[in-house]
Amino acid sequence: MPTLVIDDQKVTVDPGTTIIQAAKKLDITIPHYCYHPRLKSVDMCRMCLVEVKDIPKLQTACSTQVRDNMVVFTNNQKVLDARRSVLEFLLINHPLDCPICDKAGECMLQDFYFQFSRHTSKFKEKKQKKHKVVNLGPKIVLDSERCILCARCVRFLKEVVGTEELGIFDRGDHSEIGIYPGRPLENNYQGNLADVCPVGALTAKDFRFACRSWFLCQENSICPGCSTGCNVLVHSSERSYDKTLRRVYRLTPRDNDEVNQSWLCDVGRYGYHFVDDPDRLTAPSLKRGEEYVKVDWDTAFREVAQRLRGIFERYSPSSLGIIPSPQLTNEDLYMVKKFFNETLCITNIDFKLPGWNQGQGDGFLLKADRNPNTMGAELLGLSGIGPQAGEIIEKTRLGEIKALYLVGSDPARYLGEEKIASALSRAQLVVFQGSNYNYACKFAHAILPGATFVEKEGTFTNAQARVQKINQALRPLGESLPDWKIILGLALTMGYYFPYKAAEDIFKDIAREVTGFSGLDYKKVGDKGIKLALSGG
Amino acid sequence: MSKGLEFSKKTKERLQAIVAKYPEKGAALLPTLWLAQREFSAITPEVEEYVAGLLGLSLVRVHEALSFYTMYTPQPLGKYHIQLCTNISCSLLGAEELLAYLKKRLNIEAGETTPDKKFTLSTVECLGYCGTAPVMRLNETFYENLTENGIDQILRKLP
Ligand code: SF4
Ligand code: SF4
Ligand code: FES
């Protein structure tokens, strides 16, 4: 294995490693544009030039492989001068419109200019004019004048997605990124283009002009869009900066070699808008006649508890049905199971509504099962105790089940409105607990507002049985509460006490009781998750 | 693959010989475009699609090459394509006057084709014959030491 010296530090790496990768091992970041760790090196931008002892000309760190005894300088005067010159060239035709550019604050051109160059342009000629506000497709806009032609976008679509929708057309300083005339971007991974573009040339329509990046907080989380469980950063702000009153501004990928590498699909990336949608349920409400009245949590709990108890006393546990959702966290689901099944002895509990896992996958990241926690729901035993969810609905229609409690689930989405109307209208009690209004709410006697994935803490278990953590980025909207807390409150009102103060406490019990989870805690799950050791898995 | 367009049998044979020279099919893009331009007289979008299909390349890759090189033409050219050099040596020796003469004689501007589709006039940079400037190219043939008279003779002889 070659050992080399980079800026006076020794490092040993595998043969074939490039200088830029070896430097990274020493926590030395060599400035670069065209290099991207997940794409092939192409040596296009010359930003990564470094000096290698005994080689007269500077070398590109992104493509030069290390040799034993190599001595590399990444920051001496010669390198700094070259870097400055490269920046000067890259900025020749640049419009210098950082104040109105969405990438400002997170732009590699801006950052490196301030770090290494701060030159005054010597260029007196007219700047090259190029196309601006070019619609590349439904999600991405191109400003060619800001483009440094690093071809990351082109290579991403070629090497990762395989759709090859972007190319570099024309020649010399007329070169521009573009689509084939009349064939806009259509793939499910367009959002990544705005991430891989190191400058402000490619921007996402969803985020354009919505907020300056430095006003946003970032929190590690997991995309709830499907059972892949891509690792994301939630960019949010309690204070909204635009008319839509959104608090979440975007999701961006977090690196995870085992899950999503550095990418997100568009279905998941742009699926967060439900968080600040006007259809969010923000206060507990009870049906009084034909009207719904907002009440405080205590009143809501008391009423639901009393009516549940009434049905219990007149009939039996088999007259109650619970349909939880695989959108819920492990902690939420554990509480559902603990209280309704193990405490109240209800066996009509199941999350598998007909078709619940039959979305459309795309063969890459997006899975047909559009739920982040199906595996968790399985492992925690929220299916297979009694009848399946479809039968629970049917039993409600037949009047066998008198009280139906929906936890985050949206049965009309799978069974159609007619079926749900005919079933739910027969129930003596329908409780809907969840974050957003759906058709089932029409028939609910009590509506209990749940928090969304960005407003609570917990874990999801993805299709590979990897437990991954979501963190709270925002306060729950209005009076909404994490689902486990709602069930905890209801249980307490009914006289059952569970000693949980935080989701983490519940996870400790999951680790104690549920096979596969044993020995885990939040610390071990960490930022990258941990794969469960499942026997026969 | 696109409807209707197809190389003749002879061109297909030539294509096969060309493709055989490269380790991968896609590398034969430039000579294939060249064949296509001869056969179909222009690289229209339909031709791009045909070539992309032949070589297993994406449309974007074909379009990149097409937009990079000036000698491929997206519009059909006239039967005779006159390329007059207007670079330094030729200009010193009268290319500008010759250009004016050609424009007047053909009654078109540089970059245009006569309505009868017989002539296309282009100006080009160095053709590599500076020693015998001014020069022009008419389809595959080079003409050196040009004069207005010379041009007349050349054009008159054309079928
Ligand atoms: S648009 Fe961005 S990613 Fe694409 S070549 Fe230009 S600078 Fe690079
Ligand atoms: S693949 Fe699934 S988890 Fe990943 S971003 Fe898309 S929807 Fe979200
Ligand atoms: S990063 Fe090495 S040449 Fe661009």
Image: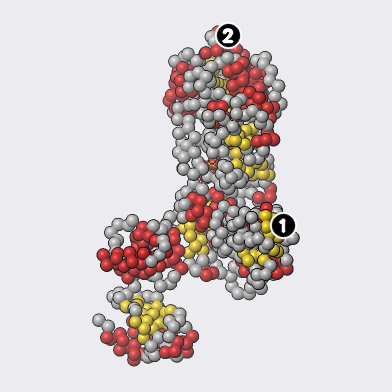
What chain does badge 2 belong to? A
- Residue B147: which quarter of the image? bottom left
Give SS at disc 1: strand
In-image side of A75 versus B19 (left or right)? right
Within 10 angstroms of label 1, few (less than 14), some, or many (20 or more) residues? Answer: some
Q: Earlier in the sequence, mark 1 or mark 2?
A: 1
- Out of B83 and B129, give the one closest to the viewer: B129
Percent x, y for residue A75?
A: 72, 63
Who's the residue at 47% across and 52% down the image? A162
**Residue lying farthest top?**
A314
Q: Is residue A114 above or below residue A421?
A: below
Amino acid beneath label 1: Lys
Q: Is residue A216 above or below residue A69?
A: above
Instruction: Please name the residue shown 65% across and 18% down the image.
Output: A491
Total numbered labels: 2
Residue A328: x and y in percent read 58, 30
Q: Is residue A113 left or right of residue B9?
A: right
Residue that mark 1 sits on: A10
- Judged from the image, the secondary structure of the residue bearing numbered disc 2 is helix
